[in-house]
Amino acid sequence: MEDKLTLDWRPHSWQSRNAGQQPLYSDMQAVDRVLAEIHQRPPLVTWGEVDRLRTQLADASRGECFVIQGGDCAESFDDCTAEAIANKLKILLQMSLVLVHGMKTRVIRVGRLAGQYAKPRSAEFETRNGVTLPSYRGDLINRSGFSTEERAADPLLMLRGYEHAALTLNYLRALIDGGFADLHHPEYWDLDFVRNSPLEAEYRRIVDSILNSLSFMETISTRPISEGYRIDLFTSHEGLHLLYEQAQTNHVAETGRWYNLATHFPWIGMRTADVNGAHVEYFRGISNPVAVKVGPGMDTEHLLQLCRILNPHNEAGRLTFIHRFGASQINERLPAMVEAVQRNGRQVLWMCDPMHGNTETTASGIKTRRFENILAELEAAFALHAQAGSILGGVHFEFTGDDVTECTGGIRGLTDTDLERAYKSQVDPRLNYEQALEMAMRIVARKARKRSAVS
Ligand code: PEP
Ligand code: CO
């Protein structure tokens, strides 16, 4: 059985459209061999999981739960280590704990991980000391070192990408199944992260309050609450490299639909969201929940066309718009978009990415983001949606579980000069674990202020 919608669609249909941000390979036979191999390998996720996420995103669009999506700007193969993976999971869990406690709502956790290996670049080439080479496009495509060999697009890296995604996902699933995220498991509450941090007392208060509620519930129910309790963790990445995504696209006989089984929740980046372009064409045919980044270059008609093409049945949970206007532009741009979507009765889950519209360069040439601007955009997003009678159903962050200094501000007041101390990102600056946790606490504090203003 085939869904009528995709009768005119195949995983390769996008190839007749203009595809931005794709690598140029010198040996297409090698590319075909790699893609054939990836296609033969088992999928990374299952269609049942993908469908479950879709249902949960529909709940989020109605305000019945809240999505937290986050992880590195770009994962690197070198960072595929037990420690880095566990730290990222830990910060995602801790942020969601703060949100669950403060917002009194279910939280859906989506990692920017297990496949976030390809990056769109604003410049095709990079010049250093008079030498010009292709830009680094992520570990899936080429290497970050600055030599001709390293910057050449290497098809084998797609295979390495699939394998590293599998290794990452395998470890994440083992951590979760092994109890890492159980409410009674000490790792979940581990305060190492926040020890000696100004946030320690507040985090401890939250943990104590949850543990108290748990023990109360267990006393009256006479059995451990965490029994049978299992957290969900979904994966997401920018579906940028279309040959790679195509190789992991499968037809599922049970549902009669096509799925991208490389990830649960792929998104279209802002630079490749052209309605006539290859990315929108590819995304149209897969039945995963899909997201599109929405930024200053787009108008309301663009959004409505995306709704019509990507969500023709107007189903809740299918389409998410992740807006990223920057603190200085959100007030001016978001309301018209929300209004157009409402007026046309379009089902959309709105999320805010307060990172990508707030990137700037310091006097000494370092790419950074200011904590105040990130928070300001987020606060504006909550306020604007509330004013419009719409719902901000989730947030999208770039963070790492490590103690980097890439964004300024936050409770330790990192300055431009601190950036040199531990700047590791090859691409965009990320919140460190402390800034990420603080961000979650600030979101919750805002909600609490609103609640007390109402009562
Ligand atoms: C990203 O999410 O890393 C990114 C490049 O975002 P955008 O497409 O919104 O610029
Ligand atoms: Co980024």
Image: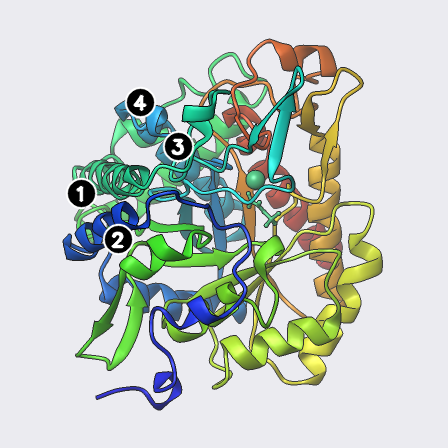
Which of the two residues, 112 or 68, is positioned nearer the viewer here? 112
Q: Are marks 3 and 1 in contact (CB under 8 Å)?
A: no
**Other residues around mark 2 within 10 Å, as few (<14) / some (14–19) / many (≥20):** some
**Other residues around mark 1 within 10 Å, as few (<14) / some (14–19) / many (≥20):** few
Which of the two residues, 25 or 320, is positioned nearer the viewer here? 25
Location of the C terminus (image quadrant): bottom right
Q: Nearer the viewer, mark 4 or mark 2?
A: 2
Q: Are marks 4 and 1 in contact (CB under 8 Å)?
A: no
Side of 207 where 179 appears, left or right: left
Q: CA distance from mark 4 to mark 2?
A: 34 Å
Q: Earlier in the sequence, mark 4 or mark 1?
A: 4
Label 4 CB less than 8 angstroms from ligand 2: no
**Other residues around mark 4 within 10 Å, as few (<14) / some (14–19) / many (≥20):** few
Q: Which residue is mark 4?
A: 83
Which SS class for mark 3?
helix
Q: Which residue is mark 3?
A: 88
Q: Which mark is residue 32?
A: 2
Q: Which residue is mark 1?
A: 177
Which of the two residues, 343 or 292, is positioned nearer the viewer here? 292
